[in-house]
Image (cartoon, rainbow, N blue to C red):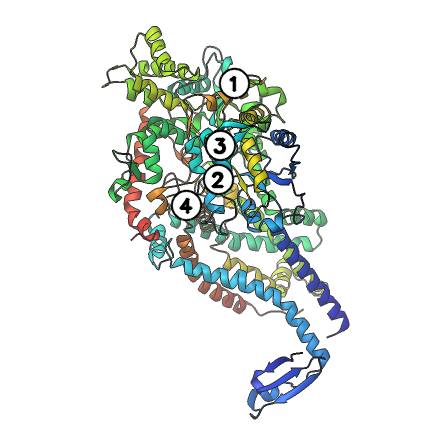
Amino acid sequence: MKKSTKVATFLLSAIFAFGSVSSLAACGVAGGKVESAENEIVVKVRKAGFGTDWLYTLKNKFEAAYKNEGYKVKILTPDNNIKDDVVVKELALGYKNVGVDLYITSGVLPDHVGVNGDYGELVEDLADTVYSQKAINYNGEEESQTVTEKLDPEILRYMTDAEGKQYAYCWAQTSGGLVVNTVKLEQYGLEIPKTTNEMFECFEAIYCGNDKMGNSIKSGTYPITYVSGQNGYTLTFLHALLAQYDRDYFDTLWSFQKKGENGEVIQLSDAECQEVYNDQTMYEMLKVAYRTFDMTIAAPGSQSQTVDQAQAKIMGNNRNGAVFMFNGDWMLNEVKLNYRNYLHNIDFVNYPVMSAVGTKLFGAGTSYNLSEEACDDLLSFVIDCVDENMDIDAIIEKVKTDKDITLAEADAKEVARARGLTYARGPEHVAYVTKGTTKMDIVSKFLRMMSSDDYAETFNVQGNGASPYCALENTTSEYKFVRNASKVTANRYFSFVSTITGARGYRGQLNFQRFFTTSSHLPFDIASNSRATIYTMNGTKKEDADLQVYADAATTFQANEVANIIKNWDSWLQNAGLK
Amino acid sequence: MEENKITAQESEEEIVLDSNCEIKKETNSKKSSGFSAYIKKNYSQLERKDFLFAYLLVLFPVAQFLVFWVYVNASSIALAFQNDLGGFTLNNFKTVYTAFVDKDMFGINLGESLRNSFILWIIGEGIIFPVGLITTYVLTRKIIGHYIFRLIYIIPSLMGAIIWTLLVRQMVDYSGPIMAICNAMGIKVSDLAYRNGFLKDPNTAFPTLVIIRSIMGIVGNNAVLTGAYTRVPTELFESAELDGASFGTELFAIAIPCIWSTICTLLTFALCSVFTCDYNVYLFTEGMGDNGTSTIGFQLFKLTYELSKGTVKSYGYPAALGLVLTVFTLPIVLVGKWALEKMSENVEV
């Protein structure tokens, strides 16, 4: 081999080797192991919607409370990418190679980092070290309740893996809901809707115009906008609608299981599974879905835009903007940089309650026997009471006084439950302690302080968010968005659903992960393909407008879904290895 | 110190490096014969170091090939015959068949995607590729402004695919320049396109995709073809011009035969990609493939992506689909390559 050839090949191989080593290094942690002192814990945090100011406050409070012990907290530069698989792969490198004690992240499921994960057990079980311990306040004193006692059992379920180990720690509670540009809404003389029928009335007034404003084509303001593609914001609305109408059905839908008379879990038969979509709850939700995501009334561009573009349509005064958008209580944090002068224009409320809930409780065939309009009126009235955080007795009394209707306690509770329910992304916000950390004692105390009432206030004010251990109403924020968003989680009737862990039970075994088998994203499919509408493209209502078109579309979709499941049932079973 | 042994098996002799890297030859009792007689036995120390160097050089790429090609593909083939629990099943192939003739368990009809893939491929390789051949040739003949045109043509190749796709998507969006031009010129577009762009109207979505694909196709091969054309000796063209050859004669009788091997390579790659190229449908349609824009490559990706999101990884169906497509593609590629090579003899210049 010639000398020049050897030099060239050597250089080439050196480049190969460098590239290989670099790529392997990239799989690891940038900069290698993080060094820390004996009494210092290393924290890696995802910088997302809540920012990270609250974490630095917590660090200062923690270090002050444990000044004598000399405990320190080293927070590595916050990064939006500290989530999902990035965290899992970094955890897989091991504590000895990384040196990070605590990850405050999101999107990592306990099953992915626990004993059932691809890499085995990567994190510490927090049952004894955190959950069964009492929370610690900013003075370093124990509170009266343990961390578990302060946490909603429903959230704890999401922090637990299939083996029952409590690997994850929930660090934020969040609520999905409806974002409203109140300045635009007030131009039409409208109020924030509390039921779906009220929402549709708003839609119609904005799209077709009223005595105060022209129609959308003239005003350039449309009722609604949404993120295109497979975005979850619109789906969360549909999940919430199902659970509002019938929470048990929602659980059955996602697990193919039901509760027996004594609360025992019963697996649905195959025939029952095949018919699970053939349900009144599903039908009512689909009707609302078809009417909500009617493409005719959506702001132009809604079918092909990112979340930033959709939010811009809500925030600004640009033409082709919108009044409503399904989003979450984190939205203000996301837009405050670019829309500083418009932050007072937006408000946040929980999802409107499906008007069918009112019809079910107060309509024909019930002891109230009210008309549909009266049902919605009563439903809206009770929702007002719920939003004011009144107890059930006070609600019943107020209904009697103001409406002269004797509301049954069960019905009042049902409305309160429906209004208090939201789709929460809290279970996605998880923290993990790296397996093999030598500073478990310090990390434990840090997480216990994070569970305190003191911290809840810090997170409330600095993160515009809610602590899952102590939901507080923010009464001091200058933004009504933040004040009203905090009311959702602080409400006494607050409860939530989440699909973060996907299908459960028998449905999980069958790997039925999608909401529907015939649609990969129902809101998008409706907006993209459905021509069911009562409006023209010119900002008017059709002369022969009939709401039945939405009902027909819902019925057809439902029938196709059921037929598809029945037709392919054997394939599902065979693919899952159950046949 | 132990001796390092390098064995030439064919010769049934052992060549041994001792601790000082000195060569010792150990001949066993068997008699050398046949092929072994042609193998050199007395390698110098320098030659051995060269061998070692060469082997080490290829060791990493070979290891990569074994892991990222052999293992991955073997695993994919195995997955096609497995259910979610790892048990043997042929159900994945049944699902693939159903998807083509009817609808699969997700309500997807792959027949439409297959048709779209073929249409895009035929237009791309049957019309756009020849157009690209001609336009590139024109530019290499140094027409007025050819530098600017070549620069413009090469810009998309320099940009990342995602940036290019997003740019094009914006151009055909409801607020993009094409819509603005249509409005300014009074061209009536459908309400659906007016509200959400040309990719959101079932009547314009696929034609828009075809046009986008065509533009990308013309500029896509420009850099490669320019390189090939510039290697053709200019004397050939000068001589042809003196003989009175027309533009067409120069192109079809001289230029194209001279770069035929490059064309064959490009077309062979194109044959391989008939089912796997998704024409950026995922990006153009926010991962939905709606309004009749779905292609096979897109569906393959989307299926795999969606099925990977569950706690149970269910890759059997897309793996079977991939295997079926490979079975169909392989003869097409082999026959196509053979036909391309038969169509014209390679011209050495």
- Amino acid type, mark 1: Ser
3 or 1: mark nearer the eye? 3
Q: Name the residue under label 3.
A: A147
* Relative image position of residue A52 (x, y in whole percent): 61, 32
Q: Residues within 10 Å of mark 4 (few under 14, many from 20)?
A: few
- Amino acid type, mark 4: Glu
Kindly identify which numbered label has been placed on residue B79. none
Q: Do the residues labelled 4 and 2 touch (CB within 8 Å)?
A: no
Q: Is residue A304 shown above or below A458? A: below
Q: What residue lies at 28% left-to-right and 15% top-to-bottom?
A: A371
Q: Name the residue under label 1.
A: A219
For the residues labelled 3 and 2, the Cα–Cα distance comes to 11 Å
Residue reaching furthest to the front: A68
Q: How crowded is mark 2: few (under 14 residues within 10 Å), some or many (20 or more)?
A: few
- Amino acid type, mark 3: Val
For the residues labelled 4 and 3, the Cα–Cα distance comes to 20 Å
Ranked by sequence position, the earlier of labels 3 and 2 is 2
Q: Name the residue under label 4.
A: A163
